[in-house]
Amino acid sequence: MHPLKRAVEYKGSVEFTRSELVGIIAFSLRLMDIKATKELIEKSIESGLLEEREGKLVVNEALLEEEEASEDLFNEMVGYVAKSLGWEREEVLEGIKAMRERYGDLDEKVLAYLFGLDKGVDMSKFKDRLEL
């Protein structure tokens, strides 16, 4: 589950001060450290997941749902490749990480798809679900 969704569920609201959001994600929920939480907030503002309004950060719930659906597809592909190869999920994730180093900063779903193809896994069932 996305850290912002966890924070919304924890607080029961989509509005946060910056320090409150850092505190919830880093300390209350212990999902990541302070530096990673601050980076997540900045990336979320850039991508539109968070909007700054009158000194508050407001979660864009529609975009957050899309983001979570995207993560679900990635996790589904990782699980499928792991099962097909008889590998552990961590081994597949390491392979995808190595591909990122080779091919640059492609979308993680595209990397998972390419990794499966590279290992000889039939990835055709995911082709139509990828946003290429």
Image (spheres, rainbow, N blue to C red):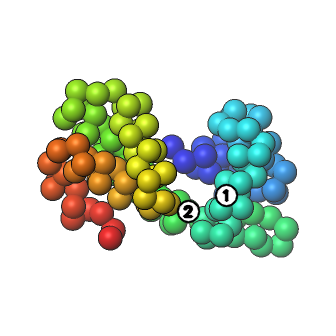
Q: Is residue 100 left or right of residue 53?
A: left
Q: Residue at x 67, y 54 (%)?
A: 40
SS assignment at label 1? loop
- Callout 2 crowding tier (Cα within 10 Å): few <14, some 14–19, many ≥20: some
| Whole-number angstrom distance, CA of label 2 to CA of label 1 | 8 Å
- Asked if residue 132 can be seen in this view, the reply is yes
- Callout 1 crowding tier (Cα within 10 Å): few <14, some 14–19, many ≥20: some
Q: Residue at x 30, y 48 (%)?
A: 115
Q: Is residue 28 left or right of residue 92?
A: right
Q: Does label 2 or label 1 sit earlier along the sequence?
A: 1
Corner quadrant of residue 126: bottom left
Residues at badges 2 and 1 in contact (C-beta under 8 Å)? Answer: yes
Indicate whether 95 appears above or below 107.
above
**Where is residue 47 shown, x and y percent of the image?**
60, 69
Residue under numbered circle 2: 61
Q: Residue at x 35, y 58 (%)?
A: 110
User: The C terminus appears in which quarter of the rendering?
Assistant: bottom left
- Disc number placed over residue 14 in the picture, else none: 1
Indicate whether 48 appears above or below 7.
below
Q: Is residue 68 left or right of residue 132?
A: right
SS assignment at label 2? helix
**Where is residue 5 shown, x and y percent of the image?**
58, 49
Name the amino acid, label 1: Val
Comparing 114 with 16, the one in front is 114
Comparing 40 with 122, the one in front is 122
Name the amino acid, label 2: Glu
Corner quadrant of residue 32: top right
**Where is residue 78 shown, x and y percent of the image?**
33, 41
- Asked if residue 69 can be seen in this view, the reply is no
Comparing 16 with 103, the one in front is 103
**Where is residue 53 shown, x and y percent of the image?**
77, 72
